[in-house]
Amino acid sequence: MSELTAAPPILEMRNITKEFPGVKALANVNLTVRAGEVHAICGENGAGKSTLMKVLSGVYPYGTYTGDIWYQGSVVEFKDIRASEHAGIAIIHQELALIPELSITENLFLGNEIQRGGIIDWSEARLRTVELLARVGLRDDPDTPIKQLGVGKQQLVEIAKALAKDVKILILDEPTAALNENDSQHLLDLILGLKGKGITSIIISHKLNEIERVADEITIIRDGHTIETLDVAGGGVDEDRIIRGMVGRSLESRYPDRTPEIGEVFFEVRNWTVQHPQVAERLVVKNANLTVRRGEIVGIAGLMGAGRTELAMSIFGRSYGKYVSGSISIDGKDVVLKDVQTAISHGLAYVSEDRKVLGLNLLDTIKRSIVSAKLSRIAPRGVVDEYAENDIAEDYRKRLRIKTPSVDVGVAKLSGGNQQKVVLAKWMFTEPDLLILDEPTRGIDVGAKYEIYTIIQQLASQGKGVILISSELPELLGITDRIYTVFEGQITDDVFTSEATPENLMRSMTSSRSKAKA
């Protein structure tokens, strides 16, 4: 018997059932977490993982679910998130809950301010912030507004915020989804370090290789039911074994087979230079050259903050930064894509990595969201054809396997992965010639990833061009035809995927020596 299995349970969730109108999200789910372990929860999108953690942390308060939560040997009834935090349970949601306008310091101690004589002690708060940021590997100024940080850094600030409280159980919902490999590595080491200090972690993640590395036990949830708990320390648990538990079948290949039919160059960016929106002297894109051929899937690889998103957004109707110089040509003709509307009318589409802020209006229904980017297609005389809207939304619901009882449901009620599918459907509906995908599989399970890869490949086989930005090198190597690497706003290399290796890509992602082909 290992030391861990001998450790007493710090947490037991017994027969947890949670219903929403029209759907049973959890049905008699059981979970046992031992003190000082890293416990992973796996399952497809919409399986009920996040719902279970929201029940535990009091987001769904006692009385809205049935079943018992045993914590440190007694039954707890959390009425809200403050009650669970007070007990030492902190949750970091997949969709970050920071206030963009406030500084890092203000966010870290919001509701938990350091006071002296009834007055907030800002100098002490700043010192504590520097310490907490150092624990998660950030060196940013404590006074930096959150909105100036990328999604990856915000994730680390969230973890620092949890560490500021006396946390016993840390729940991380997709903690590395927005992070590149280096930062993910750092975060996993951080979780293992916290384990060494006696902090228990519960991780929800789709990155099975990471789970396999850090988790002591893995509980698999499928369609709101607990399927099994695997003992990683006992051995015999690999990615394929986890996938089999998650999807109920084995996935032979992670990436669909494809024979590309690549045509002529139809989209070209030349000498593209863009300024930072706030800091005029800082260039976020430097003299970038990029081409896309018809039927080609082009990957963009780079570390967090390298300028991948900035490049994509500035191409897509100058929606980021201040344009300095450069030109874009489509089918050999120079075009000026001065705003998003012009970019869409020239056949461009951009699927943002931040689906909640830039991808969706959370007040809309699924069907309204899907048609919103090009209403003119279903409004022949200026009036939206509701039947066409419904038929199109239904078609995408089936094709993308969006888990929902109806397309009239609000997008806010969907799981993160299903929201991502709605954003994809929204931009596919515009029938683009060039689809720019920024982290399209972030926070999405292996089964759904395969479906999204298939859709991307179908678009390419129709002669469309695809630009895929991803922090996961295996994904880029598995699905693209050619890869550009970006470092500090510069394109440093352009390689055929068949000739690329993770090592040489990483080399180009961490060096400014430009090796890009003309």
Image (cartoon, rainbow, N blue to C red):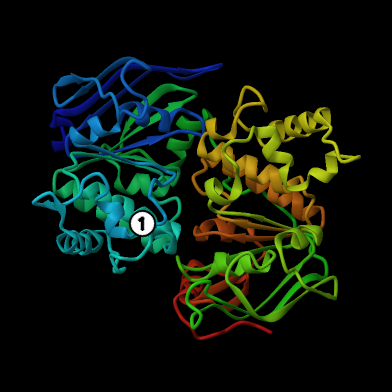
Q: With respect to residue 490, does 330 lie above or below? A: above
> Which quadrant of the figure has residue 4?
top left
> What's the amino acid at mark 1?
Leu
The residue drawn where x is 42% and y is 60% is 181
Q: Residues within 10 Å of mark 1 (few under 14, many from 20)?
A: some
> Which quadrant of the figure has residue 77?
top left
Residue sitting at the far front:
118
Q: With respect to residue 244, does 189 lie above or below? A: below
From the top left corner, tell me how far across and down residue 174 is, in percent. 41, 44
Instruction: Determine whether, in the image, residue 229 is placed left or right of residue 488.
Output: left
Q: With respect to residue 158, does 137 lie above or below? A: below
Instruction: Find disc 1 in the rendering and name its residue.
Output: 102
From the top left corner, tell me how far across and down residue 386 is, in percent. 80, 29
Assign a secondary structure to mark 1: loop
Foreground of the two, 433 or 82: 82
Which part of the image, by quadrant, shows the N terminus? top left
Which part of the image, by quadrant, shows the C terminus? bottom right
Instruction: Determine whether, in the image, residue 403 is placed left or right of residue 108.
Output: right
The residue drawn where x is 73% and y is 62% is 296
Examine the rendering and report whether any part of residue 32 can be seen. yes
Q: With respect to residue 235, does 304 lie above or below? A: below
The residue drawn where x is 63% and y is 35% is 364
